[in-house]
Amino acid sequence: MAEGSRGIQSVEVSGRILRAFVKTAEPMMLKDLAELADLKPAQCHAYLTSLKNVGLVHQDWATGHYSPGPFALRLGVSWLRGNPQTARAIEGLKALTETFGVMSLITVWGELGPTIVHTYAGLTQATLNLRQGSIFSVTGTATGRIFAAYGTAPAIMELADAEMSRTSQNQAIGEHITREAFAERIKELRERGYALAEKRPIPGINAIGAPVFSETGALAFAISLIGKSETLPMDPDSEALAGLCALAAELSPVTDMSEKVSA
């Protein structure tokens, strides 16, 4: 709490419980949730009852485990659509999806790595198991490598090192690559300003990712297109590639986008 300001303690305690869900990103037992939120189980249970009543928490009737509720998702979607930059990204990606018949994604850096926060499959039903909350590998996906190339948080390269050492416990989507291959792909990404993954990590599926920067020049999020290789070509003349890069440049309020992506 800011010095000199007053808040409502019960709301702040509820925030500790919700942050515990974000940190673990999986259903939790009461005792584990209470421990992570630094609460006694009985006290935690009382807060969870109120959070369930407003839809911020869900309890599985079979296992008793707790997880974020449907209203938590609605809050996240509301933030995406209320934030001018992400709202424009959603509309721009929708247009690209409907034009080229591929899936589009917005990915941010989350507690466990690059996390999908928005998907749009359009009229063509995607066969990929990608949804809000799915985690990408930092090293083994086009989108994940954008964070390695332009992100500054120490946790990014720590996770990348864990993935390449095969010590990461995250169930992330992506292929395993060597340190040499990873370094080469990061170098190519910075030179081009966008990331490519041809038929990897899923055979027959291509992916293109581009960085979007904030007003301060920091990486804000990544936007991506994913589709079958025949509908999403990877060559420099690809109209889908040009459209994605143009959208990324339009969304990034920096004076020289070409200089930024090649830094």
Image (cartoon, grey):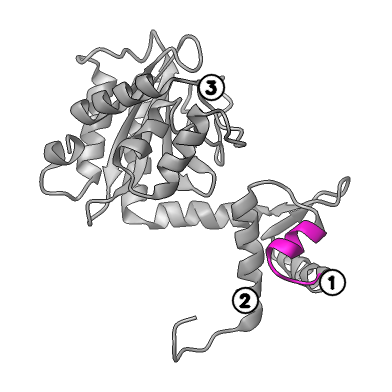
Q: Which residue is mark 2?
A: 11
Residue 82 visible? The answer is yes
Quadrant in which the C terminus appears: top left
* Distance CA(mark 3)–CA(mark 1): 45 Å
Identify which residue is drawn at 58% across, 52% down.
Answer: 73
* Badge count: 3
In the rendered structure, which amino acid carries the disc numbered 2?
A: Val
Q: Main secondary structure of the magenta part?
A: helix
Which residue occupies 44% across, 91% down? 4
Identify the mark at residue 172; answer none if there is no mark: none
Q: Nearer the viewer, residue 257 or 241?
A: 257
The magenta segment is 31-40
Front of the two marks 1 and 2: 1
Residue 238 among those drawn in magenta: no
Residue hosting label 3:
125
Q: CA distance from mark 1 to mark 2?
A: 17 Å
Disc number at residue 42?
1
Dot 2, crowdedness within 10 Å: few (<14), some or many (≥20)? few
165 left or right of 206 in image: right
Q: Tell me the residue at 20%/26% (across/down).
A: 192
Q: Nearer the viewer, mark 2 or mark 3?
A: 2
For image coordinates 54% across by 44% down, the residue present is 112
Q: Is residue 132 above or below residue 214?
A: above
Residue 117 visible in the shown view: no
Counting from the top left corner in percent of width and height, residue 126 is at: 53, 22
Is residue 43 shown left or right of residue 131?
A: right
First in residue order: circle 1 vs circle 2: 2
- Mark 1 is surrounded, within 10 Å at the Cα level, by few (under 14), some (14 to 19) or many (20 or more) other residues, namely few
The question of residue 38 being in magenta is answered with yes
Instruction: Give neighbour class at mark 3: few <14, some 14-19, many 20+ (Cα, 10 Å).
Output: few
Q: Nearer the viewer, mark 3 or mark 1?
A: 1
- Of residues 144 and 81, the one nearer the viewer is 144
